[in-house]
């Protein structure tokens, strides 16, 4: 009895659900629907616009400039008091203007203010220009504007002369070295400082020459009475020039590191007032 009831129930269920009804029945099965995967498109990330650092450049002259003639041809007035060969390209002119501005900034960063009158700057690219303005020099600061050895030109005003073969070889550091002389000499005035101190300061501030791998002391004692002559001779020697400048730089940098910049400024002011250099400087740090 229980078996028959189960069969009856099953038959009714199959009939109601469309199953078991024979070959003429319609298949009402709903086909399965395949949902395509959702593809998430990553957001478009726009990279930030990276602008090259803005490098300041000295401003073009706003007033008429004193002509500087090179074999009768006017040099190009790049900024106030800055002259280059007229063949300098537009890119070279911009690079040179940036170098001038950065040189001033470098010296100002060390001294906090630039107090000296701005010197004239004559920048040569060719050997003939160098020979005409600088004679045997490649770069020099002439505080009195005198005619350099072997040159045909007399400036008459404080002038920086510098040679460059291309902008990278000009080096902002080379210009800053010479410009440091301008400010340092102005601060100690008619007082006397040894050559090693003057050049060591310019090398320390300007970063030229590069003293990274220079460690040799060429002169045993920088404080000797005849050291200026010895220093000058070695500085003119191409095999020892950088080494002697870097020896002086190490001494000045060590002194400033121990005593601080303010005492350095006071030393220059004291020398200008008539005090003796070594009385203010004391013993050398690097013996």
Image (tube, rainbow, N blue to C red):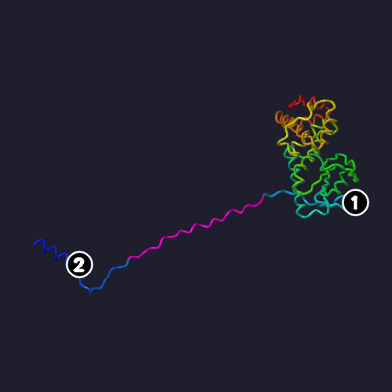
Could you say which quadrant of the image residue 218 lies in?
Answer: top right
At x 14%, y 64%, the residue is 7
Q: Secondary structure at mark 1?
A: loop
Q: Which residue is disc 1 drawn over?
A: 71
Which mark, residue 237? Answer: none
Q: Which residue is disc 2 drawn over?
A: 14
Q: Quadrant of the N terminus?
A: bottom left
CB within 8 Å, label 2 to label 1: no
The span from disc 2 to disc 1 (Cα, nearest Å) is 117 Å
Q: Quadrant of the C terminus?
A: top right
At x 32%, y 67%, the residue is 31
Could you say which quadrant of the image residue 196 lies in?
Answer: top right
Of residues 230 and 108, the one nearer the viewer is 230
Q: Residue furthest bottom?
A: 24
Q: Residue furthest front?
A: 239
Task: State the predominant SS element of the stretch in magenta.
Answer: loop
Report x, y in % for residue 190.
86, 32
What's drawn in magenta, residue-wise?
32-52
> Which of the two discs, 2 and 1, labels the residue nearer the N terminus?
2
Report x, y in % for residue 164.
79, 47
Report x, y in % for residue 131.
87, 46
> Is disc 1 surrounded by few (<14), some (14 to 19) or many (20+) residues within 10 Å?
few
Q: Secondary structure at mark 2?
A: helix
Could you say which quadrant of the image residue 180 lies in?
Answer: top right
Q: Residue furthest left?
A: 1
The question of residue 51 being in magenta is answered with yes
Question: Would you say 19 lies left or right of 262 here?
Answer: left
Q: Is residue 176 above or below residue 244?
A: below
At x 81%, y 38%, the residue is 238
Q: Is residue 69 above or below residue 251?
A: below
Question: Would you say 201 lies left or right of 149 here?
Answer: left
> Is disc 2 surrounded by few (<14), some (14 to 19) or many (20+) residues within 10 Å?
few
């Amino acid at each position: 009895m229980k078996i028959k009831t189960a069969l009856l129930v099953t038959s009714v269920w199959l009939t109601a659900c469309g199953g078991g009804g024979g070959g003429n029945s319609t298949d009402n099965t709903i086909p399965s629907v395949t949902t395509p995967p959702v593809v998430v498109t990553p957001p478009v990330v726009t990279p930030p616009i990276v602008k090259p650092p803005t490098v300041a450049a000295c401003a073009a002259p706003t007033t008429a400039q004193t002509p500087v003639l090179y074999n009768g041809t006017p040099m190009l007035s790049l900024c106030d008091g800055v002259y280059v060969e007229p063949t300098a390209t537009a890119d070279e002119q911009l690079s040179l203007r940036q170098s001038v501005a950065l040189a001033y900034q470098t010296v100002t960063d060390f001294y906090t203010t630039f107090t000296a009158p701005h010197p004239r700057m004559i920048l040569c690219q060719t050997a003939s220009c160098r020979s005409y303005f600088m004679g045997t020099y490649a770069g020099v600061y002439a505080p009195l504007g005198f005619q350099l050895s072997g040159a045909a030109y007399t400036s008459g005003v404080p002038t920086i002369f510098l040679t460059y073969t291309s902008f990278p070889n000009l080096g902002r550091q080379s210009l800053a070295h010479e410009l440091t002389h301008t400010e340092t000499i102005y601060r100690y005035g008619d007082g006397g400082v040894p050559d090693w101190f003057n050049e060591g300061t310019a090398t320390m501030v300007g970063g030229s020459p590069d003293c990274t791998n220079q460690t040799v002391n060429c002169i045993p004692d920088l404080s000797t009475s005849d050291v200026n002559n010895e220093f000058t001779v070695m500085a003119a020697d191409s095999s020892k020039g950088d080494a002697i400048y870097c020896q002086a730089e190490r001494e000045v940098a060590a002194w400033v590191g121990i005593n601080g910049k303010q005492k350095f400024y006071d030393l220059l002011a004291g020398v200008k007032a008539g005090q003796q250099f070594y009385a203010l400087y004391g013993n050398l740090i690097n013996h």
